[in-house]
Amino acid sequence: MDSDRTHEHTLTLEAFADTIVPGEKRSPDDVAIAGASAGGGAVAAGALTLLEWDAAGLSRALDDYVRDLNAHARQYAAQQRLSLDPALPPFAALPFDRRTQLVTLLTAPGHPEKELWVLLALFCYMAYDSAAHLPTAEAIAAGHPGLTSMGITPPDPDGLWRYPENSYGRPLARLHPDTTASGSLR
């Protein structure tokens, strides 16, 4: 990718991710993140990393998403008689409330591309609410914004999660006679 394309790609996808789970600006001149919410949002949670990860299955389609999202933004801006900063990708140039309105239209029942935009939105949210691209214990240790805001507890020192105070206080089923001390079957 050339640098202009990379810049457009990054700003557009970050602006979309920030529309799905807003966060605070990284700096006063941040155009991708609108600053509509305190704390880290989808971008700080690693939405671009997840979207660009081959295992997620979207990486090859991202250039098409960027092209189409910016085309929709240009069309929306024309319909709404909005002038956009020509130095920015059209979607990133939209004010946050207008980005939200456009994404609402793209994901509305009956929109012919709804499934595509909902899929992109789900992956942005997934980066925030599950850190799907990171080992959970490492994400928590690093202060992942989504897992932190949801109050996900860190694992025990051995890396395992145990919840003795959140149990039913009784066995839910009899242990199989071949169950080992670690909980596996022989």
Image (tube, helix red, strand yellow):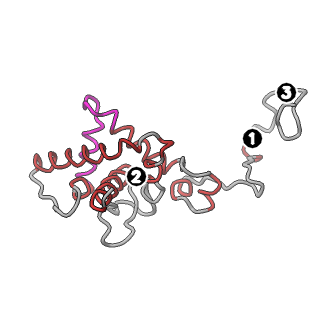
Marks 2/3 in contact by CB < 8 Å: the verdict is no
What residue is at 29 percent from the left and 43 percent from the top? 64
- Check disc 2 and report the residue beneath it: 21
15 left or right of 179?
left
SS for dot 3: loop
The percent position of residue 12, horizontal first and vertical second, equals 30, 54
Mark 1 belongs to which amino acid?
Ser
The residue drawn where x is 19% and y is 64% is 87
Q: Which residues are magenta?
A: 97-116
Dividing the picture into quarters, in which one does residue 123 lie?
Answer: top left
Residue 17: within the magenta? Answer: no
Circle 3 Cα neighbour tier, 10 Å, few/some/many (<14 / 14–19 / ≥20): few
Three-letter residue code for mark 3: Arg
- Quarter holding the C terminus is top right
Residue 25's x, y, as percent? Answer: 37, 66
- Name, please, the residue furthest toward the bottom: 28
